[in-house]
Amino acid sequence: MIILPDPLRRALIDTAVAARPHECCGLLVGRTVDGTTTIVDRIAPSRNVTLGAPASSFEIDPQLRLSLMRSLRGSSEAIIGHYHSHPRTTAEPSARDLSRVYEPDLVWLIIGLGSGSGPELRAWRYDQEAAGFAPLPIASAAPTKPSMTAHDQKPGAEPPCRRS
């Protein structure tokens, strides 16, 4: 199970909508408790640095990843996953997503904007035995740490998920 506080859920959807027609992306920071529950404490938005088509693919800025890993050393938090949007499709993992599973333990949080019934947010984890993604239930809870979201940007700054 993933625990995703409502303010972070809203920030993820807002970020995905703002990045449209491109995919937005970023990292999830939090912790795993009792071996089965993953708590998202904050999000770290990234520029989409893909060399492919940003409307249908994403790549998280490696400098963000390294910087975040350094800042988390010695803390109880870790990078627990990443998120990205599907601007024209649902929150189901794509074949491209499946081909890019390099760290099977990370959570994949996908924001789908193409369902026709409004934005949807779903969580997934790679199942090595099935060689595919398995859905993870998402629950809401109050944040336990200060959130770092796309809304924390400086006024007038480019949205973090726009390709630069």
Image (cartoon, grey):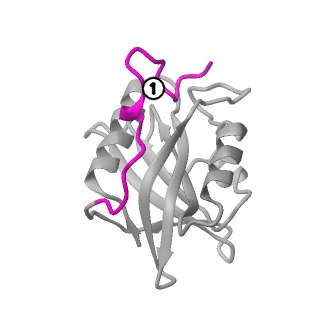
- Tell me if 68 is positioned left or right of 1 in this view: right
Considering depth in this image, is 132 or 163 the residue closer to the camera? 163
Most distant residue in the front direction: 74
Q: Residue at x 59, y 30 (%)?
A: 47
Q: Residue at x 65, y 73 (%)?
A: 130
Q: Is residue 35 magenta?
A: no
Magenta: main secondary structure equals loop
Residue 113 rendering spot, x and y as whole percentages? 38, 36
Considering depth in this image, is 125 or 72 the residue closer to the camera? 72
- The quarter of the image holding the C terminus is top right
The magenta segment is 143-164
- Element carrying mark 1: helix
Is residue 78 shown above or below 35?
Answer: above
Q: To which residue does mark 1 refer?
A: 19
Residue 61 rendering spot, x and y as whole percentages? 67, 36
Instruction: Tell me which amino acid carries mark 1.
Output: Ala
Considering depth in this image, is 91 or 15 the residue closer to the camera? 15
Give the number of callouts.
1
Is residue 125 shown above or below 57?
Answer: below
- The quarter of the image holding the N terminus is bottom left
Q: Residue at x 46, y 18 (%)?
A: 157
Residue 72 rendering spot, x and y as whole percentages? 60, 58
Is residue 91 shown above or below 106?
Answer: above
Q: Where, by quadrant of the figure, is residue 103 drawn?
A: bottom right
Residue 136 rendering spot, x and y as whole percentages? 44, 68
Most distant residue in the bottom direction: 34
Is residue 150 shown above or below 154?
Answer: below
- Tell me if 152 is positioned left or right of 118 in this view: right
